[in-house]
Image (tube, rainbow, N blue to C red):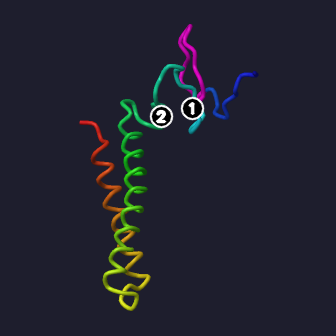
Amino acid sequence: MPPVESTRSPAEQTPVEVGEERIPCPSCERLVPAGSSYCPYCCGEDGRRGAIKRGVFIGGVFGLLAGGLAAAVWSSIVGPEKATGEWVLAITLACAAISSMLGAIHNRKE
């Protein structure tokens, strides 16, 4: 398998220490140490930024699911005349936003 070449210029990449194996990050294509569990450019030096992004995404997905369920229950309670599309969308997006915030707060490191 041929070595993967980076699209970044050599000045933008970090210097390689002697004997240290590097692999390209799948996201930013910069060379990172082969044994690292996260990219220091994408996730920050301590991984905090990556953890917060992951928490926002997972919280948003679960929030959309919970919001859809809450909107379905609410619309069955109030009836189809009062359950307009604006209210259903507002309930679903509000649950997604709240869950995204809670996911970010939960996954941040102190």
User: Is residue 12 a member of the stretch shown in magenta?
Assistant: yes
The amino acid at mark 2 is Tyr
Mark 2 Cα-neighbour bin, 10 Å: few <14, some 14–19, many ≥20: some
* Marks 1 and 2 in Cβ contact (< 8 Å): yes
Res 43 label: none
Question: SS at mark 2?
Answer: helix
**Relative side of 18 to 54, left or right:** right
Quadrant that contains the N terminus? top right
Q: What residue is disc 2 on? A: 41
Q: Nearer the viewer, residue 73 or 56?
A: 73
Q: Nearer the viewer, residue 77 or 31?
A: 77
Q: What type of secondary structure mainly makes up the magenta span?
A: loop
Question: Residue placed at 39% from the left, 74% from the top?
Answer: 72
Image height check: is 94 above or below 39? Answer: below
The amino acid at mark 1 is Cys
Question: Residue placed at 31% from the left, 61% from the top?
Answer: 98
The percent coordinates of residue 69 (x first, y second) are 38, 67
- Nearer the observer: mark 1 or 2; the answer is 1
The residue segment tinted magenta is 11-25
The percent coordinates of residue 70 (x first, y second) are 34, 70
Q: Nearer the viewer, residue 66 or 12?
A: 66
Q: What residue is disc 1 on? A: 25
